[in-house]
Image: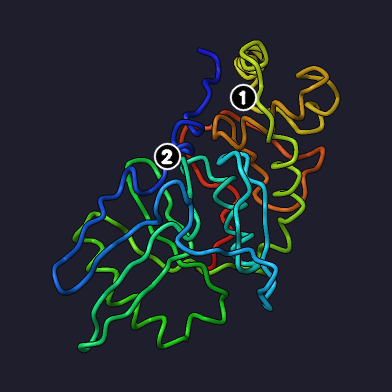
Amino acid sequence: MPFELQGHRSAANSHPRDFIRASEIPGVLSISFPLEPDLRVRRVVTRSRARRTYKCPSWKMDRMIHAESQNEVVATRLYDLDPAVSSFHEQALVIRYRFEDELRSHIPDFVVRRGEAVEIDEIKDEIDQQDQELKQRTDILTPLLAQLGLKYRVRFVNKRAQETNVQLMRRLLWLGHSEISTIEREQADRLFLKRSEISWGEINGGALGERGLQIAARLVLEGSIHLGNGSGPLSADSSLSVSRNQKSYPDLWAA
């Protein structure tokens, strides 16, 4: 069977309001969404903001993602590279919760769909791991959101790992952003049926035709094949093999 297209586009066309109920735990926590057709509960990129903001293209979401920090830009790349992630949405909901008789509001950075699970991610730098206010909010929201079937987590970006893999991420995303045809998928399928592993150098040399690099990169992004050298820039020695599970690659989150 040829490598099949993953169902990213259909998932990307939805919004968290379509798969998360605007629900609440009375007097304790509530979730609300922006009015349609708005994607975000607040504007991220504006000319009047003193703090720098970013727009980064996502092949998976087929639009520009708005980010408030470089860490969120890295997160966008990681979600795009993770074949287990079907969609992700920035600034897509407001969580209101009560703590010690005080009503608080929190706008998480991303809502992520990973398989059947819905995850709410807050993106931080490694140095924030000791932030007591952040820890307090996480301790409060994690069990409350679990009652609604939502997984809340703080993801810390590992900048040192990112630095060694940034060329790899950019190369894969640049090469793999465009669609590939059914014929190209069948061509790749026939090649990988003959060979258990193929080097990136062989692909570059024409083993998959003129668009071989684009085909291979797209299949890596979709999770159909796995880039096996672990980290660093793509090289002629980088190996490609059929993926038997949707392993995230590269995994640059901090421990």
- Which label number is shown at residue 196? 1
Quarter-wise, where is residue 49 in the image? bottom right
Question: Callout 1: helix, strand or loop?
Answer: loop
> Which x, y percent locates residue 184?
67, 15
Residue shown at the point (30%, 77%) measured from the top left: 139
Q: Which residue is mark 2?
A: 14
Residue shown at the point (58%, 47%) measured from the top left: 249
Q: Is residue 218 above or below residue 134?
A: above
Quarter-wise, where is residue 150 in the image? bottom left
Taking 52 as reference, is 21 left or right? left
> Which x, y percent locates residue 2?
55, 14
Q: Nearer the viewer, residue 98 or 204?
A: 98
Taking 151 as reference, is 191 left or right? right
Q: Nearer the viewer, residue 75 or 201?
A: 75
Residue shown at the point (48%, 38%) measured from the top left: 12
Q: Nearer the viewer, residue 247 or 37?
A: 37
Q: Is residue 21 above or below residue 236?
A: below
Amino acid bearing label 2: Ser
Q: Residues within 10 Å of mark 1 (few under 14, many from 20)?
A: few
- Whichever of callouts 2 and 1 sits on the residue coming sooner in the sequence is 2
Amino acid bearing label 1: Ser
> Which x, y percent locates residue 89?
48, 51
Question: Callout 2: helix, strand or loop?
Answer: loop
Q: Nearer the viewer, residue 136 or 188?
A: 136
> Which x, y percent locates residue 14?
42, 39
